[in-house]
Amino acid sequence: MKKVDFESGNITGSILQTAFPMLIAQVLSLLYNIVDRIYIGRIPDVGTEALGAVGFCFPVIIIVTAFTNLFGMGGAPLFSMELGRKESGKAAAILNTSLRLLVVSALIITVSGIALAGPLLTVFGAGREELLYARPYLQIYLTGTLFSMISTGINPYINAEGYSLFGMITVTIGALANLALDPVFIFAFGLGVEGAAIATVISQILSAATVIWFLRSPKNEYRITWKRGTDGRWFPYGGKIAGLGLTPFIMQITNSLVSLCCNTMLMRWGGPMYVSAMTTVTSVRQILDTPAMAITEGTSPAISYNYGARRPKRIKKAVRVMMSLVLPYTAVIWALIMIRPEMFVQIFTQDEELISVAAPALHQYFLAFIFQALQYSGQTVFKALNKKRHAIFFSLFRKVILVIPLTILLPSLGFGTTGVFMAEPVSNLIGGLSCFLTMLLVVWPELGRMEEPGLS
């Protein structure tokens, strides 16, 4: 399988060769949860209620993703930099450290999550009726945490090695399995929401098995071992991985807090129907965010590799290519939602009452979607260049300093449920512009200095 040449290959070609398989992989990865929601929303008689109840599981599922990103996405840029420096031993040590951290954290999350599922869901706003659907779904879902974290957490390393097509295949296997198994377990076996969770776990096992096969195959140039490093430590690069991984970790943890805050405020100001509407809106958001994230994350290995190799001109070109792809995409999506929001809502429900609530909510939520491209691009550059403080600050700034306070404040100022959905575009506008402009002011001068004679 052909590798992507980050060192001397065409920058645009390298980004597209990485981003396109990553896009397919991320779209298919969404099927694990999105397809569940599509089918759950169509369960006879209880679909709308069950869809809203499963929405209370999102904060916990996001926390699992946060720890996956902490040790997976946190180590991948460091891995790429060592590849650029031709330090294969250090690269292998980073990969092994990340894998061990993923396994340990997954086991802790599985045990504690299953034991505390009921109390956690109650904290996140689920009532007695919602718990009937949410608790069994979450407990079954969490049994697949180890497999989910291995398959998702190691994929950035497979992409960084240049095997982005194989990374896509590992996700495709699980996603297609989930697509096929969901209707069987939900409808044919009559297991409802529990069936959706069972199908997801089986699919995650298949994806993880494919990743493990790759790690142990001759294609992987970096030996996987459970032995301690030469310095006697189990996690020799743990601190550096976690330090850089704090950015995507905080992004996901704050997403969990935002989800909790939104559900609480919507239950207070609107009731369960508005929670179901938010579940629908965030599901649409996940789908439409995916291409933008694939483009930016697909650019990250090229930026990190060339930063390690001290090639500033290739880094600048990578950023320009990234922006030329992601900005037009977000502009087109924004226009479609402004014109026909109900078209997207109907992917998840045919309930006319829910559509009447969710369609205007989606319209409000996506008012400043174009500025999300600036946030993703700025964050990607900071993370890819190991600029932890900037990346962490802007993760906290948009969600903790802007979204959460606005979600609480705007409904109280007379906007009601509309205020909950309007918090997102306000934060996109302010946060996106601040992040991208800061990136230009910080990174561009540094790259200019690297171009000076004797420094590049």
Image: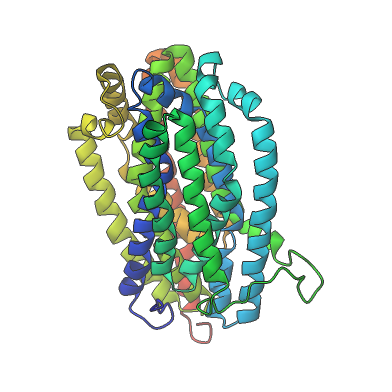
Q: Residue furthest front?
A: 189
Q: Residue at x 40, y 79 (%)?
A: 5
332 lies left or right of 411: left
321 lies left or right of 63: left
Q: Residue at x 40, y 12 (%)?
A: 414
Residue nearer the viewer, 304 or 209: 209
Residue nearer the viewer, 4 or 57: 57
Q: Residue at x 32, y 67 (%)?
A: 16
Tell me residue 311's x, y (percent).
46, 79
Tell me residue 234's x, y (percent).
76, 65
User: For the image shown, how many numbered marks are present on the structure?
Assistant: 0
Q: Residue at x 55, y 29 (%)?
A: 136
Residue nearer the viewer, 292 or 438: 292
Tell me residue 121's x, y (percent).
58, 25
Q: Residue furthest bottom?
A: 454
Tell me residue 152's x, y (percent).
51, 55
Instruction: Establish if 339 lies above or below 16.
Output: above
Residue nearer the viewer, 223 or 291: 223
Q: Residue furthest right?
A: 232
Quarter occupied by the N terminus: bottom left
Instruction: Establish if 127 lies above or below 64.
Output: above
Instruction: Establish if 29 lies above or below 240.
Output: above
Observer able to see residue 195 = yes
Residue 23 found in image quarter? bottom left
